[in-house]
Structure formats: structure tokens, C-alpha cells
Amino acid sequence: MVRGGLFLSGLLVVMLLWGCSGEGNRRNSRRGAGAGTGDGDAFVVGMAEVLDGDSLVVSGEEVRLLGIDAPEMDQACGEGDDVWNCGDAARVFLGKIVAGVEVRCGLMFRDAHKRLLSRCFVGKEDGSVDLGEEMVRGGMAVASRGEYRGLEDEAKGLRRGIWGGCLVKPERWRGGRRGCWHR
């Protein structure tokens, strides 16, 4: 009985992952090889509308950039006379990267808000630019994945963007905590 239940649970997980991988959600997408984008064989492609520093809409799909956490739209960074809206600055920064170019996002999986969680790229496949990487490198997002941690350390060391003064980690800001996390 337990063994059969485990098998059915495993099968259910596989089916859920298959459904969330985008196999059943190809509406408004173009398939093709993805140069490290998502599952390797499918992605959404199109011009992007930037929602905030880590979210965009591509071909009608809301996409959350995997591996980063950008400041919230109403989030302030800095302190004293040097306070600025770093959430809006992150949105503007991402907007400049994607302005006028096609964006490619690998179909990964959906989060609780039904957004695709994905790595997204601009440029040609042989010279593509990872949007998450650029956001962290530019000091406009916190790395939430190990692959971007070195870039975060570089941005911190150079005091780029959000690392130039008082910063409340975006997840702490969402939780209502407002004390400096990093100076």
C-alpha cells in the first residue's frame, strides 16, 4: 500500500512538472534551441514590457527573472540626504537593457502567482546577454542563486547601484522590515 502510494505520488509530481514546464502552455510562444534558456528546447520570444526590476511581460506571458531579487517599486535605498527610489531605478535599468530588442525566456516553471520563472536573454544566441546577470552586475538586484553571487560581490565591492549605501534586502522590505541590511 505504501509503495503504491509513493509510486502514484511520484507520478503526480512528474505530471505536474511536465505541465509546469510549459509543454501545455505554448500559447504565444515560439519554440527553438535555447542556449541555456530554461529546459533547452522551448522559450517565449518577443518584445518585453518591463513591470519592475525582476519582472516583465514577453509575448503575453508574465515572466519573473530566476536567480535575482530586485528592489520593490516603492522601495527606498540610501539614507539621510541620499535616499532614492531604488525600485523604480531597477525597473528603468532593466528597461534600458531590453529597449528595442527581442527577449528570449526559457520555459522553466510557474510560481504561486502563475508567472513563468525563467532566465531571459537578449542578443544573438552566440553572444546573448543574461538579464539577471546584468541586473546583478549593475548593482540593481540581489543574487538569489549561486551563479550570480560573484557578480553581486563585485557590485558590492564597487558600491554600484543598491550597494552604494543603506540597503534593505527586498525580501525584508516586503516583510515590513526597514533597517539597513548593508551599507
Image (cartoon, rainbow, N blue to C red):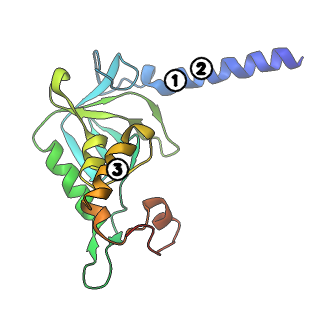
Q: Is any part of residue 152 visible from this angle?
A: yes
Sequence-wise, the earlier of marks 3 and 1 is: 1
Mark seen at residue 152:
3
**Alpha-carbon distance for marks 2 and 1?**
6 Å
**Alpha-carbon distance for marks 3 and 1?**
33 Å
Q: In this view, does 43 lie above or below 87?
A: above
Q: What element carries label 3?
A: helix
Please state, as top left, top right, bottom left or bottom right, where the N terminus lies in the image.
Answer: top right
Q: What residue type is labelled 2?
A: Met
Sequence-wise, the earlier of marks 3 and 2 is: 2
x 82%, y 14%: residue: 4
Labels 3, 1: front one: 3
**Alpha-carbon distance for marks 3 and 2?**
36 Å
Q: Is residue 37 above or below residue 166?
A: above
Q: What residue type is labelled 3?
A: Glu
Q: Which amino acid does label 1 sit on?
A: Gly
The answer to which image quadrant residue 97 occupies is top left
Q: Is any part of residue 54 visible from this angle?
A: no
> Do the residues under discs 3 and 1 have CB atoms within 8 angstroms?
no
Mark seen at residue 74:
none
User: Residue at the right extreme?
Assistant: 1
Residue 75 position, x and y percent, is 36, 69
Residue 30 position, x and y percent, is 27, 21
Mark seen at residue 15:
2
> Do the residues under discs 2 and 1 have CB atoms within 8 angstroms?
yes
Q: Residues within 10 Å of mark 2 (few under 14, many from 20)?
A: few
Q: How crowded is mark 1: few (under 14 residues within 10 Å), some or many (20 or more)?
A: some
Please state, as top left, top right, bottom left or bottom right, where the C terminus lies in the image.
Answer: bottom left
Q: Is mark 1 on a helix, strand or loop?
A: helix
- The number of callouts visible is 3
